[in-house]
Structures are given as structure tokens and as C-alpha cells.
């Protein structure tokens, strides 16, 4: 067994105080995701999958339990450390792209490097390289509003890759796209998977879910089903 | 753990990049400034309108201070010309006498006398020089040209005492004073009227039946409102100086004024006495002593005492009050400007909630967000301050150009106004910036 754990949740609970009511969004979730896996997370709305994704994305801290990202225990980190982890180890892809409108494509891709204090010339070069890789090399000077949805999502993918993250987190990346662009984006994900990236994608499309190597279903704050669909590409090629 | 054999997926140790050290701070700040300029430029009109409060605050402070400074400078110069160590006594016609005269001719005797001067000199200590002066109103002639002027009979040390130097030639001397010689020194204001073409030095001027040789010309004095109000009337500035003894001999002590049918005779020994006190600190007590002394011999209020030092102090007090009022106006307008900026920044923070969420998700620390918004606010107020300084320096210049009012822009006023505007930016920028930074990234990302 030579594959390393990238994401390890141990009995993670998350409770919210909503006025007088305590809401338990996650009630003891344990997940272990290995390097190179392509995990899809499904579940009905309100089941806690958004909470789970926020925790995985280090945007929030668990109320109880441990979260190891790589070798680091992220569950006890303070706000600044979490920011640093997000900037250096995670890549985010959102349903609504979440590009900054007043910045150009290139500047959007650069943001994670900017906050890590990269010199501008290097970050510019890295961003340019990624823009080319997602097929937007000729549009780096454009504003996001001048691009199609599929193109915007590709910018977001480039931005998620620019810091060479441990894990790429995607929250319904095709939710706002037509089927053609959606397929295009999904093939980009496939490609990333083939390159050995670790992917975690939230979706509620069964068909999309089955493109991954593993499917996790969440219900009422617990893992309902954890299905291994196939070997990850990296494991197969070894 | 099976991990150790696997190479790390991240070739760059991201978390190890700690943002400490001055060079990184400067580097980040420079970038933040660039990003800030971009974002402000995106909303040009809004940025401009936002800073108007600061612009007007700063510019009005500088302009008003400059105008105020100019006005008080002029007043103070005027007073300084009188001599800050001097006490000036003027003879004035007592008001009740004026009523009694009626239409029959009568002689009125009033004013300061030679015994007064003698008493002051003998009894009051620390009085160094006493300059008596007689003032006769008459025409001075140069053949056919004439000037209505005040002929001042005085002593040779008058110029030095009254800070009124001689411009050309010289003042008359002690010898000329003792020998009752007809010499005169002309006021600069007389020259264009009496000697428009030639130098008056060595020429003669006729007053009544006597000719006076011109030995010097006094320096011109700025004609201002202040001067007009301290002297009896506007013409008083046109003065011609002759030795006191000569004046006494030629004009006597009585002045006859023909007023319609009635004839008015006034007998005044001295019109003006200037007393120099050796020490500035003693000017006020000495002036009180002189007043007490004179009041014993002058039952009627037939003299007036001017203490330039007191006027100077008064002027300084006035200026201080003026500065306090200006300072308050400045503080209020900058406060209002600051609130305007804060208001817009708060709106901007709300508007950019999503952007803040994105930046936080992509690794921005709270500190980065604070810096971003604070830099924007400080740049706004700083730019407002700069525009304000430019306007504030330009306005007094044009005021001076078009209204002949003296304005003085003291070098510290733009500096202070500008730094206050920058401070306003920081103070009013902190709250919106903190609010932006303390937003929950999850909430911010969900914001529409």
C-alpha cells in the first residue's frame, strides 16, 4: 500500500447555533481520501455537503474531530494559518466561477500567488502558462465578462491550478453551464485526474458522479454510502 | 504511516512563505497601491465625488489661513511701524469745548504742553527719549504746485523713534534745530505732487511766507485702512517735517481757523508726544504712570494715548481667536469629509463582499484585506488632500492678484492640512477595512 492520504477526516462534527436552535450539520464524518483519487460527493440539499465542502476547503473549522490535510492538522489552525493553507494547498472551483470582475483573466489566475508573496514576474509567467494550458492563452487581457461561461470556468480552473494544490475542490462546476461547455469542463477534470491530481467534486448529477473513481453520498450529516467505482488513474498506470 | 516514501505533491513549500520582513511589506504595499488605484479608477466619478469633502476642507483651511495671516501681518506691520516700545500721546480737542464755541469767536486752549513733557521726563523713570511734535495743517508750495499737508515740527531723532527712516538725503540735525533754520524733510507722498520731474533735494518749499530748504525725503509708508483709523484722517499721511523750534518760531502756538462767519482760535502747544520706554516689558506700567501724571494736570480729556504694544498684543489675540475659529471649521469640514469617505467605503465593502470572499478563499489573510481597503481609503483622502492643497495655494494667489489683499501661505499650513487629510483617511478607513476583513469567508462567498 503505497498511496498516501491527502485528506483525512476523523469523526468530524459541525454544529451551528441558529438563534436558540443548535443545528448539527455534520454528525461524525470520517473520510480518508488518497492521493490521485477523483471523489464525487452527492446528497440532497440540506444534507451537510456544503458544510463538508467548506470544512474540506479550510473555510471553516470543525466543531469536533480532526482534519488532516497532507500531514498537517488543519482543525486547530487559526485564521491566518488557514488562509495560508488555502492559498498554498487548495484549489477552488465554484459553480458561479467566482472570478473578480474588474481584473483581467491573467490577474484572476494570479491571485493565489499574489497572496503568497510571489514576485510579480514569476507569478505572471506561471499564470500565463496555465492560461495557455486551459486554452485561453490569447484571452489573458480580457475581463471575465467578455468570456463565455465555459471560458470563465476554465479561467477558474487555471486559477485553482496555479498554486499546484494538494487537492482541487469543485462545487458543482458544471451547474451554470450548458451541456456542451459542461462536457468540455468535465473532460478537463478527467485530464487533471489522469495527470494525478486529487479532485473532490460536489454534484447532484448521477452521470457526472460516475466519472469519478469514488462516490460518497451524504445524508443527514453522515456518510450514507462510500462507493469505490474504479482504481484511480495513477494507481492503474503504476 | 505509509507516507514517507512518497514525494510531496507540492514542490513549493507554500505555507512556509511567511509575510514578514520589510522588503515583503513594501512589496505588498506597492502592489496594494496598484490594485487600489485600479479599483478607484474603475469608479472615477464616485471616487471624485467622495473626495470632494476633503478637497474643500483642505483648500478652505489653507486659503482662509493665508488670507487671515495676510490681514494680521499687515496690521501688525502697521503697529510695529509705530514702535513697540513707544507710547504715543496725541492732543485732541475735548468734546465739550466744541459745543460751547457757538458762533462767536473764542480761543480754545487744550492739549499737551511743554510742561507735560518736562514732567514726564523728570518724574517717570525708564523713559529714554521723548519726542514732542507740533502739527500744523497748511499748504506746502513749490512755485505753483501745492499740497495740503501736515507740517510736523519735531526733533532730530524722530525717524529712529518712529521706525520711519529717511529714504533720500538726511533728517535735520541738532544744530539746525537749535539755530531755528528753515529746513524740511518731505514725506514721500508729497514728491509726485510737488516735484514730479526733478529731485527735490536742495530745492525750497514755501509754507505761508517762509521758504524751507529740502534736505531729505522720508520713506513711503503703505497706505492701509489700519493707518487711516489710527490717524485722524486720511490726509494725515502726507507729512512734512521741520525742526520743532522752527515750527514754534514760525507758526506760534495759536491756530486760527476761519469757519464761515465765525472764527475759531485754537491754542495747542504740542500735538504729539512720543515716549520711548527702555524696556518692552515696562511699556504698560509706564503708560499707566504717564496717564496718572497727565490726568492730574488735564482736567479735560484733551489728549489720547496710543500704546502700540497693547495694540500689537490685541492683534495677536485677535489672530489667535481667528486661528481657533479656522481650526474648528477645518476640523469640522475634514470630519465631514472623512465621514463621507467612510460612508462610501462601507458601501464599497458591501458591494464587494463577494470579491472579499473570493480573495479570502484564495489565500488572502485578514491583514491583506485590511491593507487593501485601508490603502484605498488613504489614497482617496490623500488625493483629496493633494487637490485641496493645490486649490488652497492657488486661491490666495488669485485673491491677491484680483483684490490687492495681502495673503501669506505659511509653509506649514499645506503640510498640516495634507497630513490631517491622510490621517482622516486612516481613521475613517479602519472601520470599513476591519468590517471587510472580519467577514466570514463562507458567508461572503455566498453573497449575491
Image (spheres, rainbow, N blue to C red):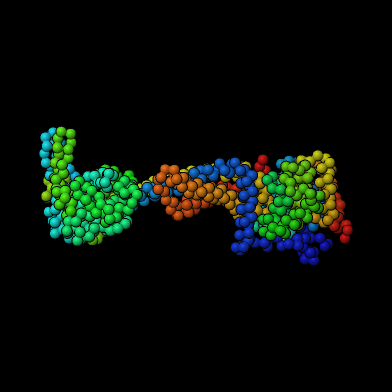
Residue sitting at 27 percent across and 44 percent down? B144
Q: Residue furthest front?
A: B143
Q: Position of residue B203 (x, y in %)?
A: 27, 53
Of the 4 image quadrants, the one containing the C terminus of chain A is bottom right
- Residue A194: tell me if it is visible: yes
Task: Pick whichever, B279 or A87, lies toward us.
Answer: B279
Residue placed at 59% from the left, 41% from the top? B46
Query: For the view shown, which residue lies furthest in the right direction?
Result: A237
| B380 horizontally vs B128: left or right | right
Residue A178 rendering spot, x and y as whole percentages: 81, 39
Relative to the observer, which residue lies in front, B104 or A214?
B104
Q: Position of residue A223 (x, y in %)?
A: 76, 48
Residue A28 visible: no
Seen from the viewer's position, the closer of residues B408 and A68 is: B408
The quadrant the N terminus of chain A occupies is bottom right
Q: Is residue B43 above or below residue B169?
A: above
Q: Nearer the viewer, residue B87 or A159?
A: B87
Where residue A131 sits in the image (x, y, percent)? Answer: 78, 52
Amino acid at each position: 500500500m503505497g498511496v498516501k492520504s491527502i485528506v483525512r477526516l476523523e469523526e468530524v462534527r459541525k454544529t451551528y447555533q441558529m438563534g436558540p436552535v443548535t443545528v448539527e450539520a455534520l454528525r461524525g464524518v470520517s473520510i480518508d481520501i488518497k492521493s490521485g483519487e477523483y471523489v464525487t460527493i452527492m446528497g440532497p440539499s440540506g444534507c451537510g455537503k456544503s458544510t463538508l465542502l467548506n470544512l474540506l476547503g479550510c473555510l471553516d473549522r470543525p466543531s469536533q474531530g480532526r482534519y488532516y490535510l497532507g500531514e498537517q492538522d488543519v482543525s486547530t489552525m487559526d485564521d491566518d494559518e488557514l488562509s495560508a493553507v488555502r492559498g498554498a494547498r487548495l484549489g477552488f472551483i465554484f459553480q458561479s466561477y467566482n472570478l473578480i470582475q474588474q481584473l483581467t483573466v491573467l490577474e484572476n489566475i494570479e491571485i493565489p500567488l499574489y497572496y503568497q508573496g510571489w514576485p510579480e514576474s514569476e507569478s505572471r509567467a506561471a499564470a500565463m502558462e496555465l492560461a495557455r494550458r486551459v486554452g485561453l492563452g490569447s484571452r489573458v487581457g480580457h475581463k471575465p465578462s467578455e468570456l463565455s461561461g465555459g471560458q470563465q470556468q476554465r479561467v477558474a480552473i487555471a486559477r485553482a491550478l496555479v498554486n499546484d494544490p494538494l487537492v482541487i475542490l469543485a462545487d458543482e462546476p458544471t451547474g451554470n453551464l450548458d451541456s456542451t461547455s459542461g462536457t468540455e469542463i468535465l473532460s478537463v477534470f478527467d485530464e487533471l485526474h489522469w495527470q494525478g491530481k486529487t479532485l473532490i467534486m460536489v454534484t447532484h448529477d448521477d452521470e457526472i458522479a460516475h466519472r469519478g473513481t469514488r462516490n460518497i453520498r451524504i445524508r443527514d450529516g453522515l456518510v450514507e454510502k462510500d462507493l469505490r467505482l474504479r482504481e484511480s488513474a495513477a494507481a492503474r498506470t503504476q | 504511516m505509509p507516507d514517507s516514501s512518497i514525494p510531496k505533491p507540492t514542490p513549493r513549500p507554500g505555507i512556509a512563505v511567511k509575510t514578514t520582513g520589510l522588503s515583503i511589506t513594501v512589496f505588498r504595499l506597492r502592489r496594494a497601491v496598484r490594485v487600489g488605484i485600479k479599483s478607484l479608477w474603475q469608479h472615477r466619478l464616485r471616487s471624485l465625488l467622495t473626495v470632494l469633502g476633503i478637497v474643500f476642507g483642505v483648500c478652505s483651511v489653507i486659503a482662509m489661513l493665508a488670507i487671515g495671516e495676510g490681514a494680521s501681518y499687515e496690521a501688525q506691520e502697521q503697529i510695529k511701524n509705530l514702535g513697540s516700545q513707544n507710547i504715543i500721546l496725541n492732543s485732541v480737542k475735548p468734546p465739550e469745548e466744541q459745543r460751547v464755541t457757538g458762533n462767536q469767536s473764542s480761543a480754545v486752549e487744550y492739549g499737551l504742553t511743554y510742561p507735560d513733557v518736562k514732567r514726564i521726563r523728570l518724574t517717570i523713570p525708564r523713559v529714554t527719549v521723548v519726542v514732542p511734535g507740533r502739527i500744523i495743517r497748511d499748504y506746502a508750495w513749490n512755485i505753483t504746485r501745492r499740497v495740503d499737508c501736515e507740517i510736523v515740527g519735531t526733533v532730530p531723532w524722530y525717524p529712529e523713534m518712529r521706525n520711519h527712516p529717511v529714504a533720500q538725503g538726511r533728517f535735520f540735525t541738532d544744530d539746525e534745530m537749535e539755530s531755528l533754520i528753515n529746513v524740511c524733510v518731505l514725506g514721500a507722498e508729497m514728491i509726485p505732487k510737488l516735484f514730479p520731474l526733478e529731485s527735490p533735494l536742495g530745492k525750497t518749499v514755501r509754507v505761508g511766507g517762509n521758504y524751507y530748504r529740502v534736505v531729505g525725503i522720508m520713506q513711503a509708508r503703505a497706505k492701509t485702512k489700519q493707518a487711516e483709523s489710527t490717524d485722524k484722517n486720511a490726509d494725515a499721511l502726507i507729512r512734512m517735517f521741520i525742526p520743532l523750534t522752527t515750527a514754534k518760531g514760525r507758526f506760534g502756538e495759536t491756530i486760527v481757523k476761519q469757519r464761515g462767519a465765525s472764527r475759531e482760535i485754537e491754542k495747542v502747544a504740542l500735538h504729539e508726544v512720543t515716549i520711548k520706554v527702555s524696556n518692552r516689558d515696562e511699556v504698560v506700567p509706564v503708560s499707566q504712570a504717564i496717564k496718572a501724571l497727565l490726568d492730574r494736570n488735564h482736567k479735560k480729556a484733551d489728549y489720547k494715548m496710543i500704546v502700540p504694544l497693547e495694540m500689537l498684543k490685541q492683534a495677536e489675540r485677535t489672530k489667535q481667536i481667528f486661528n481657533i475659529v479656522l481650526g474648528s471649521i477645518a476640523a469640522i469640514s475634514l470630519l465631514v469629509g472623512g465621514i463621507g469617505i467612510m460612508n462610501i467605503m462601507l458601501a464599497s465593502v458591501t458591494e464587494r463582499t463577494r470579491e472579499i470572499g473570493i480573495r479570502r478563499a484564495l489565500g488572502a489573510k485578514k491583514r491583506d484585506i485590511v491593507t487593501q481597503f485601508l490603502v484605498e481609503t488613504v489614497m482617496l483622502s490623500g488625493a483629496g488632500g493633494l487637490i485641496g492643497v493645490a486649490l488652497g495655494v492657488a486661491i490666495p494667489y488669485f485673491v491677491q492678484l484680483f483684490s490687492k489683499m495681502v495673503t501669506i501661505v505659511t509653509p506649514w499650513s499645506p503640510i498640516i492640512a495634507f497630513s490631517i487629510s491622510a490621517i482622516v483617511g486612516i481613521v475613517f478607513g479602519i472601520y470599513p477595512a476591519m468590517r471587510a476583513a472580519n467577514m466570514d469567508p463562507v458567508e461572503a462567498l455566498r453573497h449575491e
